Image (tube, grey):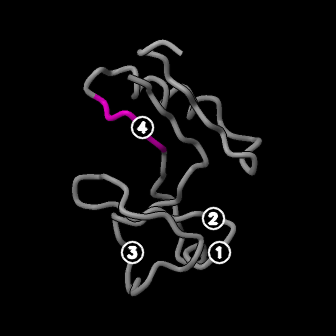
Amino acid sequence: LDADDVVINVQGDEPLIDPAHIDLLAEALLDPRAPPMATLAVRELPRPELADPNLVKVVLDRAGDALYFSRSLIPYQRAASPFILRHIGLYAFRFY
């Protein structure tokens, strides 16, 4: 791989991933100021889905960086939070 190549990993349990999401992730990593890895998450996480083990949740810090991913119910979730999102099964890496 060349130093500026971007590798996108589509998880096997996400065969119907929206191609626009792949493009969005690739474009984000083409920015030379971007971190060497990225993933996507969306805010659409209705309360009943918080406990669904088939949906991966991601918790963000205030800067928007992922703290952890979980298939389990996020502990101490009392109300809707802007810091808990539904993870989309895509990861992107850039090699230096």
Choose the circle earlier in sequence order: 4 or 1. Answer: 4
In front: label 4 or label 1:
4
Q: Are marks 1 and 2 in contact (CB under 8 Å)?
A: yes
Q: Badges 4 and 1: C-beta atoms under 8 Å apart?
A: no
Residue mark closest to the camera, 2 vs 4:
4
Kindly report which numbered mark, 3 or 1, lies closer to the viewer in this rendering: 1
Stretch of the chain drawn in magenta: 34-39
Residue hosting label 4: 37
Disc 1 on helix, strand or loop? loop
- Residue at (48%, 32%) from the top-left corner? 93
Q: Quadrant of the C terminus?
A: top left
Instruction: Specify which label sits upstream in the sequence, 2 or 3.
Output: 2
Q: Residue at x 47, y 78 (%)?
A: 74
Residue designated by label 3: 80
Q: Amino acid at mark 1?
A: Asp
Residue 41: where, in percent of width, then height?
A: 48, 51
